[in-house]
Image (cartoon, rainbow, N blue to C red):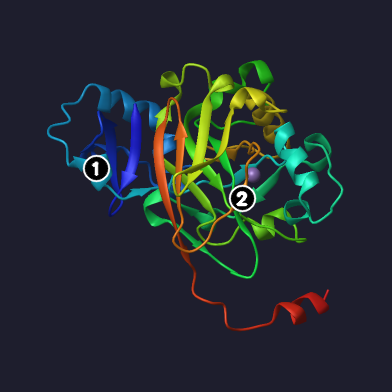
Amino acid sequence: MKLCRFDDHRYGVVKDDQVYDVTALVEPMLPHPLKVKGDPLLANLSTIVAKLKGADLGKPAKSVKAAKFLSPVAFPTKIVNAPVNYDLHIAEAKADPGISFNRPSLSIGVAGLFLKATSALVGPGEGVAARFPDRRTDHEIELGIIIGKTASDVPEDKALEYVAGYAIALDMTVRGTEDRSFRKSIDSYAVLGPWMVTADEMPNPLDESFSLSVNGTQRQSSSTKHMIYDIPTLIGWASRWYTLYPGDIIMSGTPEGVGPVGDGDVMLCKFDHIGEMEVKVRAAPVMSHGSAAREKSKG
Ligand code: MN
């Protein structure tokens, strides 16, 4: 099942390029946010999906093209990210100081995972507001893994049982010398969408092909089979450092082909068994206070 949030916080089921509004069915089944850890929709997902599968969805509310998609997860407790998880991306970063800033390249096992702020999370319909136009904002297309069950110290051979579903993720990034979490947590720099495909509809998440183009020109194209740490490894590892709660998102790393985007660019992301996601980039309002030179000198 393809589950989405769209327009003014409506819940939807996507079928045959149409969006069915299931808000009236879903909302009464959402637990109170103070009574669960994590995202209320994901915390009760199996019950909600069972109800939706047996329900008459009526007529579609609108076409996929006409819907403004929000992040399928509203309230993750964290967005866990894998850095340097594809060999060819590591190679391009080493070759391009505009990506690496000549930092030594640590392998993922040495670098560890990092977190993006949940306030950075948007859906594709909200777009990306590129900040600091004098610096490079890059796209990084990644498989977004959405956790469905509370997970702590999960063995790798059971890890996929903790996945509720998958979505397309963009780990938008300002390149530079600062810590990853600082450069990758800007408002709108975590895109998730356009919907969540439940895990039963993803035939093999360990070999899922995907691509990203900007203004019609392809830049990234790979498969999740090229991950250095695969999905079970990422889930198990993350769950030994912090408990994963329903709705937590793991952005699993980007392949080669990252590059800059700016005002007016349109990114088109595709995953074979998720679908397509279009994301527009605009210029964020200029940050007029402070000065980069002064902020750096305070270090
Ligand atoms: Mn990334």
Front residue of 153/133: it is 133
Q: Residue at x 77, y 41 (%)?
A: 112
Q: Quadrant of residue 85?
A: top right
* Pointer 1 with pointer 2, Cβ within 8 A: no
The percent position of residue 16, horizontal first and vertical second, equals 25, 28
- Outermost residue, left direction? 59
Residue 205 versus residue 101 in the image, above or below: above
Is the residue marked by circle 2 packed among few (<14), some (14-19), or many (20+) residues within 10 Å?
some
- In the rendering, which numbered label is found on residue 181? none
Q: In which quarter of the image is the C terminus?
A: bottom right
| Three-letter residue code for mark 2 | Gly
Q: Disc 2 marks which residue?
A: 259
| Three-letter residue code for mark 1 | Thr
Front residue of 58/265: it is 265
Q: In which quarter of the image is residue 227?
A: top right
The percent position of residue 74, horizontal first and vertical second, equals 43, 48
Q: Which of marks 1 and 2 is nearer the N terminus?
A: 1
Inspect this view and state whether residue 72 appears: no
Q: On the rendering, which quadrant does ligand 1 occupy? A: top right
Inspect this view and state whether residue 176 appears: yes
Is the residue marked by circle 1 packed among few (<14), some (14-19), or many (20+) residues within 10 Å?
some
Q: Quadrant of the N terminus?
A: top left
Count of labels in the image: 2
**Does any atom of ligand 1 lie closer than 8 Å to the CB of label 2?**
no
The percent position of residue 297, horizontal first and vertical second, equals 82, 79
Q: In which quarter of the image is residue 252?
A: top right
- In the rendering, which numbered label is found on residue 23? 1
Marks 1/2: CA–CA distance: 38 Å
Q: Residue at x 72, y 28 (%)?
A: 228
Residue 218 versus residue 121 in the image, above or below: above
Residue 239 versus residue 10 in the image, above or below: above
